[in-house]
Image (tube, rainbow, N blue to C red):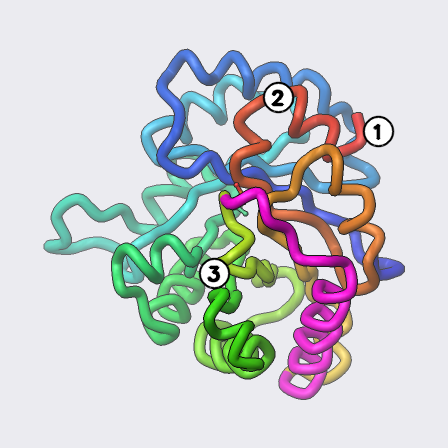
Amino acid sequence: MTPDIKPLIAGNWKMNGLTAALSELRIVSDAVTPAIAARADVLLCVPATLIAQASSASYGSPLMIGAQDCHAAVSGAHTGDISAEMLVDAGAQMIIVGHSERRADHGETDAAVRAKAEAAIRAGVPAIVCVGETAAQRQAGKALTVVGGELAGSVPDSANAETVVIAYEPVWAIGTGLTATPDDVNEVHAFIRQELVLRFGAEGYRFRILYGGSVKPSNSAELLAVSNVDGALVGGASLKAADFLAIIGV
Ligand code: PEP
């Protein structure tokens, strides 16, 4: 954790969840009391199809609802895509951009991710910009180079701590059960902090830097205690209310 930074615990349901899954979300929204929300922001990024219903289901709770991706344009001839403005209109309060699954499955470049982050900011909500190296890149000793390149390319020049959250997600740790060691996380998060300060000056100390990659109740406390870890981006373990609440510390 970084002193004076309010942590963010964010769940990413990925392409999981029909209407029935809102029962899990309701358990989370009932448990996230103002007292819990005073010490950590809590967010669930549900599939776009559930954003409006999730917003209604959590009405009155400090639980925030988010989206997992957006198109860079406001509107237009982009069949099947959804703009940041549409997501916000449906109830999204934050938008993940540049998740490694989108970079891999849809060939999203740093420039595309940057444009999406700018779109989220334009629509009035923070972007959670994901960065992280593959196993091969780590083995080749290139983890910091890759993360530095993605940060430089994906984070807009206009970013500040209110409009952008960084998520460090080593690709080899996502959905694999493998977790980076606290030492690895410490090294990369310290590097990200340094890069943010180099680029944004003192503002760089205020950005939230989340860790993501097989975070679960059994390892969350250890990972969240690492310096410069200001929260978590949680995939699989966010699907079960009990696991997600255990990570939040409820
Ligand atoms: C993710 O979806 O961003 C993620 C980190 O997934 P998991 O926690 O399942 O590894």
Residue 180 magenta-highlighted: yes
As drawn, is 75 to the left or to the right of 237? left
User: Residue visible at 41% across and 31% down?
Assistant: 51
Residue at image coords 78%, 50%: 224
Q: CA distance from mark 3 to mark 2?
A: 29 Å
Which one is nearer the viewer's eye here, 38 or 98?
98
Q: Secondary structure at mark 3?
A: helix
**How far is mark 2 from mark 1, CA to CA?**
18 Å
What amino acid is found at the position of numbered circle 1 in the picture?
Ala
- Looking at the image, residue 77 lies above or below residue 240: below
Q: Quadrant of residue 10?
A: top right
First of labels 3, 1 by sequence position: 1
Q: Tally the numbered discs.
A: 3
Instruction: Identify the residue shown where x is 82% and y is 47%.
Output: 222
Which circle, 3 or 2, is nearer the viewer? 2
Q: Which residue is mark 1?
A: 35
* Residue 121 marker: 3
Q: Residue furthest right?
A: 3
How far apart marks 3 and 1 lie (CA) works out to: 28 Å
Considering every residue shown, the one lying at the far bottom of the view is 198
Q: Amino acid at mark 3?
A: Ile
Query: Is 79 situated above or below 204?
Result: above
* Mark 2 or 1, nearer chain start: 1
Expressed as whole percent of the image width and height from the top left, the position of residue 163 reads 58, 61
Amino acid type at circle 2 is: Ala
Category of crowding for the residue at label 3, using alpha-carbon neighbours closer than 10 angstroms: few (below 14), some (14–19), many (at least 20): many
Q: Position of residue 194 (x, y in %)?
A: 72, 81
User: Is residue 74 something one can see in this rendering?
Assistant: yes
What's the magenta region? 176-199
As drawn, 228 above or below 191 = above
Find out whether residue 62 is within the magenta segment. Answer: no
Q: Which residue is mark 2?
A: 241
